[in-house]
Image (cartoon, rainbow, N blue to C red):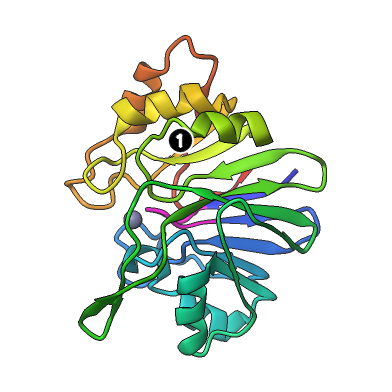
Amino acid sequence: MIEITWLGHGTSKIRLESGEVMLFDPWTEGNPAYPKGHTFDRVDTMLISHGHFDHIHDAIPIATKFNPSRVVAIYETAYWLESKGVKNTLGINKGGSAMCGDVKVTMTHAIHSCGILDEGKIIYGGEAAGYVLTLPDGRVIYFAGDTNVFSDMALIQELYNPQLAFLPIGDLYTMGPHEAAKACRLIKAAKVIPMHFGTFPPLTGTPEQLAKNIEGSGAEVWKLEPGKPVQW
Ligand SMILES: [Zn+2]
């Protein structure tokens, strides 16, 4: 079993059976959905889907504090993080895989933008991405990052067959429940963890809307509470 904790918005952490912690898209400071009182005890792998502030805001301080063994991002964003003093960056690109401890991490496509806000200017951060994690026991997780639905999600299903998917559903900056329902049907994961909703009032998509839209598909919406760990 692994332990999954959604930390609000696009931020999640996974504690592996080995005890190692993988942290996705850290936004803690100023994240209205970040659970009060939550603390990290370790971070072994940090995974960044793209360079927007709500996904990398706390990457630098957390990397400085916990010195993860790898900080994975698309090449340009990884280079930027390295330029800010982050150690052990691992810049990869779509279709590429890297072993992060005993988990195989594969970068996938995402339909989103990826500018990095740096001292009042937006600089090029490469492209937004998602990740497929293949656990040592063979189970597969798809972390979509911020994205719209795209038909090549069917390729992600064919190639990796994820059983669990993290999908954004909030609308406005990402797909909403209507598009996310199509994503569920393409990815065919048994369980879907909704994210990137409810953080601010304009992110209007809800897990209940998604659940209604995927009735009969065989997929289950797994609504997590920020800061409350679940086992999978
Ligand atoms: Zn975002």
- Which residue is situated farthest in the left direction here? 202
Q: What secondary structure characterizes most of the magenta part? A: loop
Q: In this view, does 140 lie to the left or right of 200?
A: right
Tell me if I can see residue 161 in this picture.
no
Q: Which residue is drawn at 68% across and 70% down?
A: 44
Q: Quick check: is the Cβ at mark 1 less than 8 Å away from ligand 1?
A: no
Q: In the rendering, at what x and y percent does residue 100 appear? A: 72, 63
Q: Nearer the viewer, residue 59 or 35?
A: 59
Q: Residues within 10 Å of mark 1 (few under 14, many from 20)?
A: some
Q: Residue at x 21, y 44 (%)?
A: 172
- Which residue is situated farthest in the top direction here? 216
Q: In which quarter of the image is residue 160?
A: top right
Q: Is residue 221 above or below residue 16?
A: above
Q: Nearer the viewer, residue 166 or 92?
A: 92
The magenta span reads 6-12
Look at the image and tell me in which quarter the N terminus lies: top right
Q: Is residue 89 above or below residue 167?
A: below
Q: Which amino acid does label 1 sit on?
A: Lys
Q: In which quarter of the image is residue 51?
A: bottom left
Q: In the rendering, at what x and y percent does residue 5 appear? A: 55, 52
**Residue holding disc 1:** 223
Look at the image and tell me in which quarter the C terminus lies: top right
Q: In the rendering, at what x and y percent does residue 120 appear? A: 20, 82
Q: Is residue 174 above or below residue 191?
A: below
Q: In the rendering, at what x and y percent does residue 114 appear? A: 35, 62
Q: Which residue is drawn at 57% across and 42% down?
A: 142
Q: Nearer the viewer, residue 35 or 102?
A: 102
Ligand number 1: quarter of image = bottom left
